[in-house]
Amino acid sequence: MSNQNLSYVQYSDEVEVKQPDEDKTIEEIIASFERMRRFVYDKHRHALRGAHAKGHGAVKGQLKIYDNLPTELKQGIFREPRTYDVIIRFSNAPGDIIPDAVSSFRGMAIKVIGVEGRKVLEEKADALTQDFLMINHPSFPSGDVKKYLIEQLAQEKVVTVPEEAQQLVTTALRTVNTVTEKVGLELYPTSLGITKPETHLLGETFFTTAAHRYGDYIAKISAVPVSESLIPLIGKHIKIDNHSTLRDLTVEFFRENGAEYELRAQLCTNLERMPVEDAGIVWPEEESQYQPIAKITIPPQDAYSPARRVYADEVLSFSSWHCLPEHRPLGSIQRVRLKAYETSSRFRHEMNQQPRVEPRSINEMPD
């Protein structure tokens, strides 16, 4: 269907509604994150991200905002056709370094450089960057804080299970899911994404999953592989034959190839069918399609040099809350992220004795 003549929901502070006992629930989630973080630190004698700990590569590129966007899409950093430098980090969702054979959601974190204007997070208010965080699923499996607490407590238990057992569980569930899909069913994915198939990381479509303010409107954003180099990788099944197959494939690809992803925005047209407070609901595209807003172009490069790995994994931080007010995260899942990402970043940088800084130039990222 066409998006022409659709009536888009106007943003206002009233679109967010806190849940009963939400603050208490968030504190319980943060406490679970803290226990996991300490366990993982003791395991590795090194502090990792509380989520998306395992990076598969980091690349430099450019984000070009499309010209002649309709008024409703010309919002925030997309309000004018200009080009920004970007840093992109590819990752797996868990807060631990585990074998790639253990299925999980994959992440694409985008840091846009050169974004002027005061940012939401006070500590980074004067930074010249803005982040977009995405995973390869159109919704967040646990859609609100109460469901997320249940998932988080389950993840806390999984972290302490031996890797061999984790791999057996994910292989069994992935097999069951393949069978059920053939009869029109699908296992509901957990926050870890353990039923996800073994497909090529770079052929995935990534989504913000939860809602963001989009200037005068409300939206979710996706990143879709569109270049001739990436299209053959869409849905391509791969063989996981070592601990870091996804890294190896990423490095191998970018050694010889460039890539293009198109950013698209899905504007909210109905708060009942496209809710802000339940990130577990997939917004129906028959009511509002994802519309092109920009293109990311990534040239060939070394995606995992020693200096780059240290910079991307140790120095850089990514947060959905590091943004202009025009792109502020919305909903209870996003409100959990506000504190969870901040405490995780502070712990990681302090324990590893790394600076908490935002780049002011793409040249700060090593080759």
Image: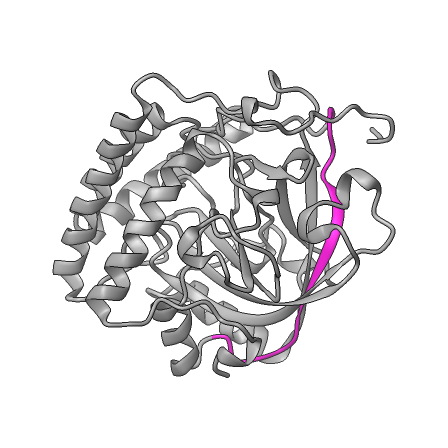
**Residue 296: within the magenta?**
yes
Q: In which quadrant will I find the N terminus?
A: top right
Q: Is residue 135 left or right of residue 69?
A: left
The quarter of the displayed image where residue 259 is located: bottom right
Q: Which residues are magenta?
A: 286-303
Q: Residue at the spot x=22%, y=32% of the render?
A: 28
- The way the protein has been coloured in the rendering is one colour
Front-lying residue, 116 or 340:
116
User: Residue 188, how many percent across, how many down?
Assistant: 43, 28
Q: Is residue 100 left or right of residue 321?
A: left
Determine the residue located farthest toward the left in the rendered image: 42
**Residue 225: within the magenta?**
no
User: Residue 119, how many percent across, how many down?
Assistant: 52, 52
Quick check: 53 above or below 113? Answer: above
Residue 194 visible at all: no
User: Residue 181, how many percent across, how many down?
Assistant: 52, 30
Front-lying residue, 50 or 241:
50
Q: Is residue 340 left or right of residue 214?
A: left
Quick check: 145 above or below 113? Answer: above
Q: Residue at the spot x=37%, y=66% of the render?
A: 244
The quarter of the displayed image where residue 334 is located: top left
